[in-house]
């Protein structure tokens, strides 16, 4: 544990609950994108958890992920709901360069991949059905191969949307496509489109604009967080083919990001805001999601997600609608606290870094030690545990709910929990990369329009 935060955590035990921290800054502005998984911020505000910590917080929706990141870097925002790849990419200098850290992971799962009605009808003959005639889920991207071939035969490019080059959605969409034998394309330092040698052309579309862009025919499918997959179903313009829970069971999603400078300059404030977010995550999952209906009402408000409550509830309350009327139980579609969802595991960071390397955003091979070092620079379980210890001491949390003795690495994800049947071990990133059939491995690099090495 970082010495400063360890000292703060232990000293907090000796003072009265709720008066333990002398805040260096108590007026804060946090940014978010209009997605269901910003919920811990909304709940920490609405339930008064920020105020309990002496924090006067303003929440501001941002236009897109780049604007949000820039706002944190230049200090207009004190912190934000972020794509997990953003702090990592910024810290290693991919795109905008800045040292961003995260003391709190916001959720597990929560995303889906949706295709247009046209594409769905073309895919259906390639998808096995269940005894009742409904399509069998998860749907393999192999069912998309004949569709892409048909598009190409008619001179039509096959286009799909994702929310940002270092987003979970980009990497999940690429993972799904590659697992079905489809090359989603590579990046290089000279060509950052991500479309080098691609069978499918991926491009950036902001989350709330996904359904309208699909309806306009600009893209043929997309990968996005909720409620924008369910919105396609509600509008009758598309069909989700897979959730990320089916892609990789209990995969990490968003994080809460702050600059390293903020954490250094305002250590007590950082612990306090982390405490409030932990409490919000606990509230969202407690009593078998008993509070989700109330959360849906809050999130549906225009200042937060601004989608119809019924659309948000489709996934937020433990179900998921694939086609109109085809509603299936997915109790862990949104997880905010269970399974140590809020703990910033190094192994989660390493997975994102492996995907950056797999597709060429990290242009050169790196050692396993490098992946570990970057993960430790960005993910801060020391801050998280300092906050958790204070909550336990204040009788606001149960000590059994936190992984005190973790080395920061989860047990390897078994092959059965991942769509391509390939296990993931965060302690061996290069061996993992070598095990993936499509993607850079070993000393390979992208040169011009070719993969070499």
Image: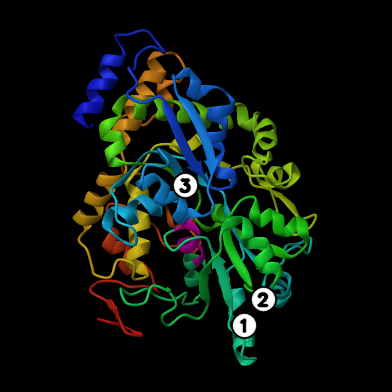
- Please state the extent of the stretch shown in magenta in the rendering: 167-173
- Label 1 sits on a secondary structure element that is helix
Q: Position of residue 450 (x, y in %)?
A: 34, 85
Image quadrant containing the N terminus: top left
- Label 3 sits on a secondary structure element that is loop
User: How far apart are the alpha carbons under marks 3 and 2?
Assistant: 33 Å
Residue indicated by mark 1: 146
The vertical placement of 443 against 133, above or below, is: below
Report the residue at 32% width, 8% height from top.
Answer: 15
Crowding at mark 3 (Cα within 10 Å: few <14, some 14-19, many 20+) = many
Q: Marks 1 and 2: CB-CB under 8 Å?
A: yes
Lower position in the chain sequence, tag 1 or tag 2: 2
Q: Is 265 or 199 nearer to us in this picture? A: 265
Lower position in the chain sequence, tag 3 or tag 2: 2
Q: Is residue 95 left or right of residue 182?
A: left
User: How far apart are the alpha carbons under marks 1 and 2?
Assistant: 8 Å
Q: Marks 3 and 2: CB-CB under 8 Å?
A: no
Q: Position of residue 331 (x, y in %)?
A: 63, 42
Q: Position of residue 409 (x, y in %)?
A: 31, 44
């Amino acid at each position: 544990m970082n010495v400063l935060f360890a000292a703060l955590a232990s000293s907090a035990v000796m003072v009265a609950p709720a008066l333990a921290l002398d805040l260096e800054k108590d007026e804060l502005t946090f940014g978010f994108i209009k997605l269901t998984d910003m919920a811990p911020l909304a709940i920490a505000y609405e339930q008064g958890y920020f105020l309990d910590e002496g924090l006067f917080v303003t929440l501001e929706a941002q236009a897109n992920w780049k604007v949000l990141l820039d706002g944190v870097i230049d200090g207009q925002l004190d912190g934000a709901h972020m794509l997990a790849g953003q702090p990592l990419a910024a810290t290693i200098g991919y795109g905008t360069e800045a040292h961003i850290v995260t003391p709190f992971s916001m959720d597990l799962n929560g995303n889906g991949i949706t295709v247009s009605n046209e594409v769905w009808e073309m895919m259906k003959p390639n998808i096995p059905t269940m005894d009742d005639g409904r399509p069998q889920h998860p749907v393999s991207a192999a069912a998309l191969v004949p569709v892409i071939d048909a598009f190409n035969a008619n001179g039509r490019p096959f286009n799909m949307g994702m929310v940002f080059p270092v987003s979970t959605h980009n990497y999940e969409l690429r993972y799904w496509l590659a697992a079905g034998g489809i090359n989603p394309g590579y990046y290089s330092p000279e060509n950052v489109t991500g479309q080098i040698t691609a069978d499918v052309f991926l491009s950036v579309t902001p989350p709330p604009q996904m359904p309208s862009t699909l309806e306009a025919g600009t893209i043929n499918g997309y990968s996005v967080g909720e409620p924008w997959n369910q919105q396609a179903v509600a509008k009758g313009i598309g069909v989700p083919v897979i959730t990320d829970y089916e892609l990789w069971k209990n995969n990490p999603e968003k994080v809460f990001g702050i600059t390293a400078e903020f954490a250094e300059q305002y250590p007590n404030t950082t612990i306090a805001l982390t405490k409030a977010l932990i409490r919000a995550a606990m509230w969202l999952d407690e009593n078998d999601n008993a509070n989700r209906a109330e959360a849906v009402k809050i999130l549906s408000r225009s200042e937060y997600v601004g989608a119809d409550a019924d659309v948000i509830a489709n996934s937020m309350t433990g179900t998921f609608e694939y086609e109109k009327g085809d509603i299936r139980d997915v109790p862990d579609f949104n997880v905010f606290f269970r399974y140590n969802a809020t703990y910033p595991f190094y192994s989660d960071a390493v997975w994102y870094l492996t995907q950056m390397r797999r597709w060429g955003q990290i242009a050169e091979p790196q050692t396993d030690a490098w992946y570990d070092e970057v993960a430790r620079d960005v993910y801060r379980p020391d801050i998280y545990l300092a906050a958790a210890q204070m909550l336990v001491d204040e009788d606001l949390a149960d000590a059994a709910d936190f992984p005190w003795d973790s080395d920061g690495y989860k047990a390897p994800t078994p092959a059965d929990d991942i769509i391509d049947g390939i296990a993931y071990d965060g302690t061996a990133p290069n061996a993992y990369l070598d095990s993936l059939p499509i993607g850079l491995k070993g000393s390979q690099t992208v040169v011009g329009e070719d993969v070499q090495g």
